[in-house]
């Protein structure tokens, strides 16, 4: 559009010089025409500009390195489509930081359009996208007219799984004893003679026939020490990424066995007792700048099984 402005103003100056130099009727009408046609172009573009709006639709949260997409939607309801759209997008990683990136999108004459673009998932963090500037141009391409901008969207790049080396046996090492489970299913059982009041569905029928007496298969549950995972908040991004990806792996192991645990992340102590609790925690820390901090152990640490997550060898070498 800059070229059109240059051509228009060059033509206007040329006709102006000719008019003031010679004062002919033809140059007079040419000058009036050149001064009026931008106004006409602007008036014709106003219906589309007043009804135009732009909107961002976010993609799903994704693990690091996987593909994620964000959609840009723009539309107007005027009788004529605009000459062109010019939209500038701004992206900022709230966790990893770094410079804010901009992407300028120019689209031709359309009343309704949708454009899909890929997001950068090479680094962990909540990536906030917003429309920094959205304009349409009049039919001469001289005037950029601002249009309505939708709100921002956020795509969270989640940590992938990294196996700690050596892999800790948290499930095995936290088990201390067995105790009868009041109700529900359990893979652990204890065999004992029948006692008055025992439910019939607990009778081990095959073994009872062999023993010629009722034998109860009583469910047991494991008594565990509290598991405490400890994470420092490193200043280096690669080290921070490594400890979070190891946490993702260990959380999966514990969640599969339905074992809750405490997480000491810097100075914050968090109870992770469900998938939602872990998701809320990880999305929360990825939505703000990472500040380095040493982990401070809580009072429960004296009786807990403590495992300190440290950066992997590759991350330490990169730092």
Image (spheres, helix red, strand yellow):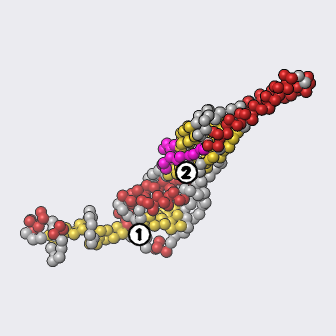
The image position of residue 166, as x and y in percent, is 43, 56
Q: Nearer the viewer, mark 2 or mark 1?
A: 2
Which of the image's four quarters has the N terminus? top right
Task: Determine the secondary structure under disc 1.
Answer: loop
* Residue reaching furthest to the right: 21
The image position of residue 10, as x and y in percent, is 81, 28
Q: Badge 2: few (under 14), some or many (20 or more) residues near its Cα, within 10 Å?
A: many
Task: Determine the secondary structure under disc 2.
Answer: strand
* Magenta segment boundaries in residue numbering: 53-69
Q: Is residue 23 left or right of residue 97?
A: right
Q: Quadrant of residue 251 in the image?
A: bottom left
Q: Which of the labelled discs sits on residue 226, or is there none?
A: 1
The image position of residue 40, as x and y in percent, is 72, 34
Residue 303 against residue 77 in the figure, above or below: below
Who's the residue at 45% across and 62% down the image? 277
Residue 47 against residue 213 in the figure, above or below: above
Q: Is residue 158 visible?
A: yes
Q: Total number of numbered labels?
A: 2
**101, 12: nearer the viewer:** 12
The image position of residue 93, as x and y in percent, is 59, 51
Who's the residue at 63% across and 39% down the image? 48
Q: Is residue 31 left or right of residue 177?
A: right
Give yes or no for residue 67 being in the magenta stretch. Answer: yes
Who's the residue at 81% across and 29% down the image? 32
**152, 90: nearer the viewer:** 152
Q: Is residue 224 left or right of residue 247?
A: left
Q: Is residue 295 visible?
A: no
Who's the residue at 91% across and 22% down the image? 22
Per the image, the residue denoted by label 2 is 154
**163, 244: nearer the viewer:** 244
């Amino acid at each position: 559009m800059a070229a059109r402005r240059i051509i228009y103003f060059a033509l206007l100056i040329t006709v102006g010089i000719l008019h003031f130099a010679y004062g002919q009727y033809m140059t007079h009408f040419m000058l009036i025409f050149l001064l009026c046609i931008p106004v006409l172009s602007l008036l014709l573009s106003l219906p589309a500009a007043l009804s135009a709006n732009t909107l961002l639709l976010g993609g799903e949260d994704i693990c690091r390195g996987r593909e994620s997409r964000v959609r840009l939607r723009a539309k107007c309801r005027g009788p004529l489509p605009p000459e062109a759209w010019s939209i500038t997008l701004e992206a900022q990683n709230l966790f990893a930081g770094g410079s804010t990136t901009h992407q300028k999108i120019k689209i031709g004459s359309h009343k309704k359009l949708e454009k899909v673009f890929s997001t950068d998932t090479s680094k962990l963090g909540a990536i906030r996208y917003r429309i920094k500037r959205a304009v349409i141009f009049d039919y001469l391409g001289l005037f950029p007219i601002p249009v309505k901008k939708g709100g921002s969207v956020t795509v969270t790049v989640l940590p992938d799984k990294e196996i700690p080396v050596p892999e800790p046996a948290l499930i095995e090492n936290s088990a201390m004893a067995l105790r009868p489970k009041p109700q529900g299913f359990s893979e652990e059982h204890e065999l004992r003679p029948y006692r008055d009041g025992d439910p019939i569905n607990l009778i081990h029928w095959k073994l009872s026939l062999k023993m010629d007496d009722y034998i109860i298969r009583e469910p047991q549950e494991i008594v565990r020490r509290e598991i405490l995972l400890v994470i420092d908040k490193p200043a280096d991004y690669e080290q921070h990424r490594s400890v979070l990806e190891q946490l993702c792996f260990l959380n999966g192991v514990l969640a599969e066995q339905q074992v809750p645990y405490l997480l000491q992340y810097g100075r914050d102590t968090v109870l992770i007792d469900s998938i939602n609790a872990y998701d809320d925690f990880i999305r929360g820390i990825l939505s703000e700048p990472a500040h380095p901090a040493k982990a401070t152990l809580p009072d429960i640490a004296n009786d807990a099984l403590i495992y300190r997550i440290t950066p992997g060898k590759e991350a330490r070498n990169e730092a």
